[in-house]
Amino acid sequence: MAWDPQTYLKYSGERARPAADLLARVPVVAPRVAVDLGCGAGNITRLLAERWPAATIVGVDGSEAMLASARAAGIRARFERADIADFRPDVAPDVIYSNAALHWLGDHAALFPRLVRVLAPGGALAVQMPRNHHRPLQSILSAMVDEWGLAPRLVGVAGRSEILAPEAYYAVLMPHVAALDIWEVDYLHVLAGDNPAFEWAKGTSLRPVLAVLDAADQGRFLDTYAARTKDAYPRDGQGRTLFPFRRTFIVATARG
Ligand SMILES: C[S@@+](CC[C@H](N)C(=O)[O-])C[C@H]1O[C@@H](n2cnc3c(N)ncnc32)[C@H](O)[C@@H]1O
C-alpha cells in the first residue's frame, strides 16, 4: 500500500490549511523537541521548524517514498522511519504534532493516552484527522467495498476504521491530561479539474482498497468509483466543484 508523494501533494494547499489551523492552537511556546508524527513529504514539518526555530524537529513516517521527498526538501529537521504504533522516543518530546495521519492507525482508545504518556511534563499532543464517513467520498467507497465483497480482505487494514466521535476522544483523554481542546471544522473546498473528488481520494482513501485488487480489477474499480464521485460532486458552470470536508482537531496538554 505505497504512498505516492506526487498524488498526495496535488491538493497540498487545501491540505495545508487544517495543518496550519492546528499548529496555531498548540500552546507550547518554546519546545526543545517537537515531533511530526506521520510527517509524509515534510511540507508540514517545515511549518513546525519555522514556528520553533530553536527546537529539535523530528519527522517520523513509515513510508520510505514520503521520507525521501521530505529529506530532499531542505527542511531543518531530522527524518526517521518508524511505525507510529511503535513510537517510543528516546527523549520525551514537548510537542507531538500529527496532521492527517493517526486515522490510519486503529485502537485510538489505547494509542492517544499512550502518546500523552511519552510527552515531557506540560507538553502537548496536537492531532488533526478527517471524519467524512457520512460524505459521498467515503460512503461510495464503503458501498463499493460491500458490492465487491472486499470487506473480509480489508479487516484490520490501516485506514479502514472509522475514527471516534469528539465526545469519545474527550472521554479517552481527559483522565490523563491537564487540559483538552477538541473541535471540528467543515471546510468547503472549491476545487478545479474534471473530477477532483476522485483525484483527492486517489491520494489517500482509495489506496488500501486498490492494494487488495489485481491490475485489471483496479482499473474497473477506479472507473466505477470515478463515475459515481463525478455524479456526487458535480461541477458548476465555471468548472468548480464544491468539496465539503470535515476534520476533527484535538490538542491535549500533559500535566506539568
Ligand atoms: C495523509 S499523509 C499526511 C502527511 C503529513 N502529515 C501532511 O499533513 O502532509 C499520512 C502519512 O502517515 C503515514 N503513516 C500512516 N500510517 C503510519 C504508521 N502506522 N506509521 C508511520 N507512518 C504512517 C503515511 O506514510 C503518510 O505519509
Image: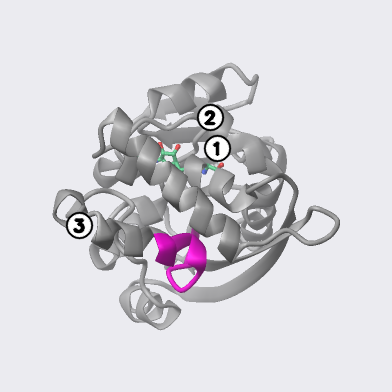
Residue found at x 49% / y 35%: 40
Q: Quadrant of ligand 1?
A: top left
* Residue under pointer 2: 5
Q: Quadrant of the N terminus?
A: top left
Question: Does residue 66 lie above or below 85 as drawn?
Answer: above
As measured in the structure, the alpha-carbon distance from the residue carrying label 3 to the one carrying label 2 is: 27 Å
- Asked if the beta carbon under badge 1 is closer than 8 A to the nearest atom of ligand 1, the reply is yes
Describe the element under mark 3 as helix, strand or loop. Answer: helix
Residue 7 position within the rendered picture, expressed as x and y whole percent measured from the top left:
55, 33
* 118 relative position to 100: left or right: left
The residue indicated by pointer 1 is: 8
In percent of width and height, residue 118 lies at 33, 52
In the picture of the structure, the residue carrying the numbered disc 3 is: 151
Residue 55 in sight here: no
Can you say whether 171 is above or below 27 in the image? below
Q: Quadrant of the rendered structure where residue 21 is?
A: bottom right
Question: Mark 2–mark 1 contact, CB under 8 Å?
Answer: yes
Give, as a three-letter code, the residue at label 1: Tyr
